[in-house]
Image (tube, helix red, strand yellow):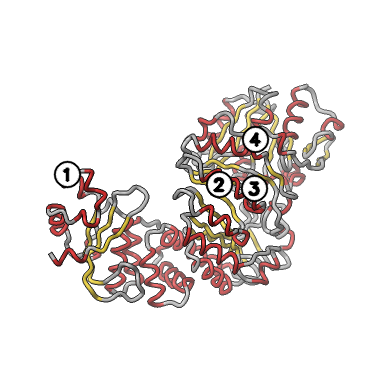
Amino acid sequence: MKIVLTTLNAKYTHHNLALRYLRAYCGPEFPGLIVKEYNINQQLGLILSELVDESPDILGFSCYIWNIEQTLVLISDLKKVLPEVTIVLGGPEVSYDARNLMGRHPQIDYIIAGEGEEPLLRLLKLLEAGGIPALAQLNDIPSLVYRSGGRIYANPQMTMDLSRIPSPYQNYLDELEHKIVYFETSRGCPFRCQYCLSSRTGKVRYFPMEQVKADLQRLAGLGIDQIRFVDRTFNCHPQRALELIEFMSELETRTRFQLEIGGDLISEEMVQLLEHAPVNRFQFEIGVQSTYPVTLREIGRKANLDKLAFNCRKLRERTSVRLLLDLIAGLPEEGYERFGRSFDFVYNLKPTYIQLGFLKLLKGSRLRERVAEFGCLFTEQAPYEVLQTKSISYSELAFLKKIEGLVENYYNSGRFQSSLDYLIARDYERPFSFFEHLAGKWKENNLHLVSHSLASLYRLLWEMMGNKDPVLLSYLRFDFRLHERKQATPKWMHGKPASELKRQVIKDGRVFHCLPHLKPLQLTSRELSKRFAVEIFDYNVYPWRAKPEQQRQILVFDYSRDNQVKVYDATQWESR
């Protein structure tokens, strides 16, 4: 009996954790089990041919909102080409609407709703025995949804004992090259947010600490770029979180660990521990979602926003932790203007990244059952994204999409910090008002209909917001020089020629007053020139200030370090 488990990931760099668990759990009794991963950007015809070539007896799909539509097309075609294949679906997208899904799609033979390790193993054993399974035999498999005698049955779901699940990261580690690795130390969530499926998975359960640490040690040794924890609230068990953060801090690795953290649950002890963590070791994703008390009450979300803000500031000021703050547009009772206030709250915390998302009415979520209460219309097909509510119109949500794109390009890129800060201080009381205005200009000029190069983003910000403001031009040039180390400063930025000054300070050694760490390297003039840049400004733009004085300033941008660019004020060079 040939078994193939597969999925369509959202991106090539993603990796499916569920399939690794299933293979680890079922593999000892079915050593020939094969895992095949694809992604939604590949042609379905190609994926179909690859799966047909495997000639499977049993074909299992891991289903999510990003792949369910393509998966249903695939299984329809697969059944035409391989009519005898047994199709099994699992995953969150099929776990909460299994009966209806099977009724609409006769190609589906079985669905496993919920945690699938033990149910899949039992099903495989039953199918291996051959023949048509009896109703009593199928009824004995937990979490199974199946057909018998023209009817569809759904068995009660089971909750796995996590100590019985073997590590998904003992073997097949070569599959992880160039991938983002997903990892969990627990299942379940202590909170009951009504838009989230985790609120329906029961109390929090933990994997054995010894197994967790062994897996992290093994993965860290591979040099993986990023490990993303899928624990819903990593620090809901404070002491366990501290122990693991200390363990990850001490690993000899370049891997970055992304954790979903309850922002108001961060302790001073954790901050002190993170003060000593290596740079780029941790990235915290913190869900704010909304700051409107009425909305938070409606979605069952309890958070101390003052404490969350206080903790975020401590992390930003005292540690090197990267902060990702989440917002959700389209939640009950939160209108366009009120969402703008939530945006301002998050923006003013100066996170590394603002994740501006839009409400998705997931199957099985409590909020999906209440759509009539808040007048919510949403897309019929996955990802079931909100179109409008009684509090926010379709047009307003569509405009927020344009703002989302600008936040992604200008704020989240991290390349325009000085320019954005200046523009907001110059003309706007609120960050949201600035992005509103910019989005309006973007739409007016149809700029949202085309993609833009990085170089054009600098130019467009000047053209849309500059009005020939020489201070903005100076800040744009500062940002460009700080982040685009391999590109020459564009001529339209009107920078004063500094090439002759750069040659002079290399020749007479003045450059080592700013960059003494380069002197022992004994670089040639040409090699040394590649390690730094010099820019001359008409305004005193560094350190940043809202109203810089009109005063000549010479800045040196040190590119000799891999992780960051350092800036030095070298205005004193002109005294020579």
Label 4 vs label 2, nearer the camera = 2
Q: Which of the pair 20/376 is nearer the observer?
A: 20
According to the image, label 4 marks what residue? 21
Q: Which of the pair 451/482 is nearer the observer?
A: 482
Callout 4 secondary element: helix
Across and down, in percent, residue 145 comes to 77, 39
Image quadrant in which the C terminus is located: bottom left
Label 1 vs label 4, nearer the camera = 1
N-terminal of the two: label 4 or label 2? 4
Would residue 454 be found to the left or right of residue 392 on screen? left
Q: Are marks 4 and 2 in contact (CB under 8 Å)?
A: no
Q: Residue at x 31, y 71 (%)?
A: 472
Callout 1 secondary element: loop
Residue type, mark 3 in image: Arg
Residue type, mark 4 in image: Tyr
Q: Which of the pair 119/419 is nearer the observer?
A: 419
N-terminal of the two: label 1 or label 2? 2
Would residue 70 be found to the left or right of residue 550 on screen? right
The Cα–Cα distance between marks 1 and 2, rounded to whole angstroms, is 43 Å
According to the image, label 2 marks what residue? 246
Q: Residue at x 67, y 67 (%)?
A: 296
Residue type, mark 2 in image: Glu
Label 3 vs label 1, nearer the camera = 3
